[in-house]
Amino acid sequence: MTAYVYVSLKKSVLDPQGKTIQGALNKMGYKGLGSVRQGKYFEIMLDQGISREEAHSEIERIAREVLTNPVIEEYRFSLAD
């Protein structure tokens, strides 16, 4: 089983790196961009012996306690067989 974890800044937090990327894309001629926000992506391979419920619980805990700063970041994840 594989967990895919996406971490991004909360909507209320300014994203200067995203703004810089947006500016660069605009200068390069890309059209139709409303805004750009950057984040982090983690792909976590899980042991075969773990149940889906255990995996969900562990990944939730890892994302909340290790991968994100809860003051400024939020996360979402999915599990795939």
Image: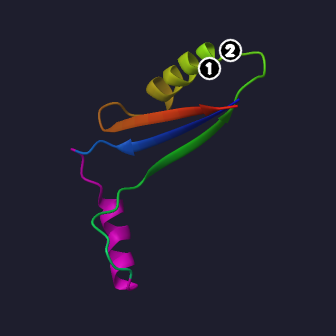
**Residue 7 image offset from top left, x and y in percent:** 44, 41
Residue 23 among magenta residues? yes
Secondary element under disc 1, as helix, strand or loop, is: helix
Looking at the rendered structure, the kind of residue marked 2 is: Ser
Q: Is residue 17 above or below residue 66?
A: below
Residue located at (60% from left, 31% from top): 79
Residue located at (29% from left, 32% from top): 71
Q: Is residue 57 above or below residue 11?
A: above
Which residue is more in the foreground, 78 or 75? Answer: 78
Disc 1: CA contacts within 10 A as few (<14), some (14-19) or many (>=20): some
Residue located at (49% from left, 47% from top): 40
In this figure, which residue is indicated by the disc labeled 2?
51
**Residue 64 image offset from top left, x and y in percent:** 44, 25
Q: How is the image coloured?
A: rainbow
Looking at the rendered structure, the kind of residue marked 1 is: Ala
Quadrant containing the N terminus is top right
Residue 54 among magenta residues? no
- Mark carried by residue 55: 1
Secondary element under disc 2, as helix, strand or loop, is: loop
Q: Main secondary structure of the magenta part?
A: helix
Q: CA distance from mark 2 to mark 1?
A: 6 Å
Extreme left residue here? 12
Residue located at (50% from left, 20% from top): 61
Q: Is residue 77 left or right of residue 28?
A: right
Q: Quadrant of residue 56?
A: top right
Do the numbered discs 2 and 1 sit on residues whose CB atoms are within 8 Å? yes
Quadrant containing the C terminus is top right
Residue range of the region highlighted in magenta in the rendering: 12-29
